[in-house]
Image (tube, grey):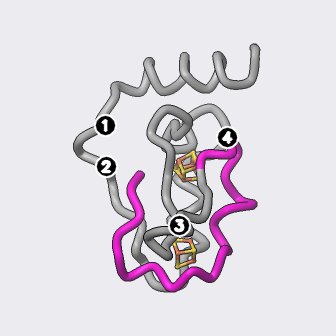
Amino acid sequence: MRIVETCINCAACEPECPNGAISRDEAADIFVVEPALCTECVGAYDSPRCVEVCPVDCIVVDAAHAEPRAELQAKYARIHGL
Ligand code: SF4
Ligand code: SF4
């Protein structure tokens, strides 16, 4: 997923990410998603948790980092040492 510039820095998404992929970008003054850690919540939830909790709908699919579901599942397993 990718956070766009309309992010209001509420921090609601950060603790919801099962992979620790979300952090505050102090320089840009918005929150950001680390693509290497985002599995679109595959492995943990049925749908992206960050999208569900964001009050301003500023989290979108990151087309530049699109991955098949099987790869997202494998990434989740790698991240969590499964
Ligand atoms: Fe984290 Fe899931 Fe959002 Fe990706 S989609 S950033 S894994 S909460
Ligand atoms: Fe930004 Fe949405 Fe995350 Fe709040 S929940 S910090 S508005 S991306």
Mark 3 and mark 2: span between their CA atoms?
14 Å
Queried on whether the Cβ of the residue with tag 4 lies below 8 angstroms from ligand 1, the answer reads yes
Number of numbered labels in the structure image: 4
Nearer to me, 42 or 37: 37
Mark 3 to mark 4 CA distance (whole Å)? 15 Å
Residue closest to the eye, 79 or 24:
24
Q: CA distance from mark 2 to mark 4?
A: 16 Å
- Residue at image mark 4: 19
Is residue 32 part of the magenta span, yes or no?
Answer: no
Q: Which mark is residue 65?
A: 1
Residue 1 image position (x, y, % from top left): 41, 51
- Say whether marks 1 and 2 touch (CB < 8 Å): yes
- Residue at 41% from the left image edge and 27% from the top image edge: 69
Name which of mark 3 and mark 4 comes first in the sequence: 4
Q: Amino acid at mark 2?
A: Asp
Q: Name the one closer to the observer, 56 or 29.
A: 29
Lateral position of residue 14 relative to residue 3, left or right: right
Q: In the rendered structure, which segment of residues is drawn in magenta?
A: 1-21
Which labelled disc corresponds to residue 31?
3
Disc 3 is placed on an element classified as: strand
Query: Is disc 4 placed on a helix, strand or loop?
Result: loop
Amino acid at pointer 3: Phe
